[in-house]
Structures are given as structure tokens and as C-alpha cells.
Amino acid sequence: SEVLLYPRAIFNDPFRGAPHVLVLAEAINAWDKEPSAGNSRAECAKIMEKYAALDPWFGIEQEYTLMKPAKIGEAPKVPLGFNDDGSEPAPQGPYYCGAGYGLAIGRPVADEHYKKCLQAGVKIAGINAEVMPGQWEFQIGPCRGIEMGDHLVMSRYIMLRVTESHGCICSFSPKPAEGDWNGAGCHTNFSVKPMREDGGYDVIIKVCEAFGKVAAEHIKEYGEGNDKRLTGKHETCDINTFKYGVANRGASIRIPREAEANGKGYMEDRRPAANCDPYRVTCRIMKTTGECLAP
């Protein structure tokens, strides 16, 4: 029953300060030295090493929802900013990238998290308020290979620590509130070296076509409860449909307008849910891409 912890990534401890550190570790079985159940990082590391010559870059947009605490031991059900009388707030729209009381609900949490990530050495690139009250996003990346999962996992841990002192709960549920509200995703921006070079747009299209052939396999790795989010509404493509397009936020894969114009760039997989395992997501993306571009 013994499980060993193998250190894999070290960050500065933004809570206690130097010389303390936060260590991200893998769980390894003591009896056979194999990855323990739930250790998805090990397989991801193998795939990243296998296709290291492609030099994969990732950037993940982590959406989350700040929730009002429920009873201890129960999952929260009411987002921060929803009315105390049980009625819903004004429809989504003004909250997105909003400013001001009643719009940017939870900014102290988002700001503190951003600062703590910077202090830790996490590759955080920005934050913004999202479309539902209490819903926010932070962006992690660019990261290379296995680094993507490491930095996103640590950023989530830091978020959970931050909310402890703000009287709210951070939810990574893909559909934290029923009704006409956007869900929460983990849009994954991705490129390999051939995509970033001249002629890379054709490589992007080739990889998109390959993704379409194994769309169901990808969805299995993209988070639990994602069917409640990927409905074809609220800037999503239906979970049973696959399509890609330029500047199309209703597609499974969005290709930036700039990538089409420049003939090279990156692609954005909009399907991963907010609660996805980043190791499983990036592993699956890299596996499909590597097989597609194999000589």
C-alpha cells in the first residue's frame, strides 16, 4: 500500500516566502515502481518525449466560477454574485471583462491569485472576468510539453489556497449553474514547430482533419460532465459534432484569423472542460498530432 512521491517540478512558495518551496510530485507504487492509479503525468511525459522534436507549445485558458459556500461537505450550488433571494441576476453580457461593483464580482480573488502565481514562478499570462457573475478566467502559457500540465496544476492549487481567505469556493465544474449561462472550459491553444514555420497553415488543417477522425477519443479525455457544457449553444460546438473553422467560436477547433493571414501559427481546441486533467488533454492532443505528422 506504500506510494512514493517523486518530485517533478519546484515552484517558489508564494504563501510562506523564501526559502520555502512548493513541490509538484508524481505518485509511484513502492512495490513495482510503476505510476500509481490516477498518475496521468507519467504517460503524458512519455508522449512528450516521443515527439519532442516537434517542440509542442501550449497555452490554456482556465475558466472557473467562484461559488457561495454550502454546508461543510456539500458541493456549492450558487455562484458568487447571484441574488440571496434565489432569483437570478441580470442576463450575461455586462459581466464579461467588466469593471465596477456588481459586475466584476470576485476581483480580489482573481487579482491575488495572479500575484501569487507570479511569485511562485507559474507561467501565468493574464486574467479576465467571464460572462457569468462570479466567473473568471486565467491564462497559463506559453508552456512547452509536460510543462503545461505542471504549471496548470500548480495554478489550480494556488487558487484553492487563495480562496480559503476570501469566503468563497472555487469550482471547476463545466456547468456550475443551470440555465442560460455559459459553462466553464479550458480552451487549449496548441502548436508544433511545423505549424509555426512558413507553410504551417496547411499543417494546421492536416492536424484538424486528424482530430476529426478521433473526435470521440479526444472527448473522453476532456473532462467529466462536459456534455452539459458542449450543447451547441453558448459559444460551443455540440459534443457529438466536430468542426473547425477560422475565427469560429462555435467550432470544436478555432483557427485564429491571424494564422490564416500569416500562413502559419496555432490552433485552439475549445472542447476541454474546466475540470479536465491537463496531462490527459495535452497527451491526447500530442498523440494525435504526432501520429498525423509521422514521416
Image (cartoon, rainbow, N blue to C red):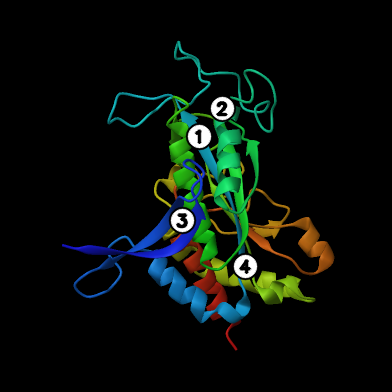
Determine the residue positioned at 58% across, 24% down: 105
The N terminus is located in which quarter?
A: bottom left
The reply to whether callout 1 and callout 4 are in contact (CB within 8 Å) is no
Viewer-nearest residue: 243 or 166 = 166
* Label 4 to label 2: alpha-carbon separation: 37 Å
Question: Secondary structure under badge 4?
Answer: helix
Q: Which residue is tagged 1?
A: 65
Q: Is residue 284 left or right of residue 111?
A: left
Give the quadrant of the C terminus.
bottom right
Residue 106, disc: 2
Amino acid found under the numbered disc labelled 1: Thr
Quarter of the image for residue 56 reads bottom right
Q: Which of marks 4 and 2 is nearer the N terminus?
A: 2
Q: Name the residue under label 3.
A: 222
Label 3 crowding class (10 Å Cα cut-off): few <14, some 14-19, many 20+?
Answer: many
Furthest residue to the bottom? 295
Q: Say if 123 sits above or below 54 in the image.
A: above
Mark number, residue 203: none
| Residue 250 in view of the camera | yes
Tell me the element at label 2: loop
- Secondary element at image label 3: loop
Marks 3 and 1 in Cβ contact (< 8 Å):
no
Number of the front mark, 3 or 2? 2
Query: Residue at label 4?
Result: 208
Q: Which amino acid does label 3 sit on?
A: Tyr
Q: Mark 1 or 4 closer to N-term?
A: 1
In the foreground, 218 or 13 = 13
Q: Which of marks 4 and 3 is nearer the N terminus?
A: 4
| Place of residue 289 in the rendered image (x, y in percent of width and height, measured from the top left) | 57, 74
Task: Confirm or deny contact between disc 3 and disc 2 (CB under 8 A).
Answer: no
Circle 1 Cα neighbour tier, 10 Å, few/some/many (<14 / 14–19 / ≥20): many
- Towards the viewer: 233 or 48: 48
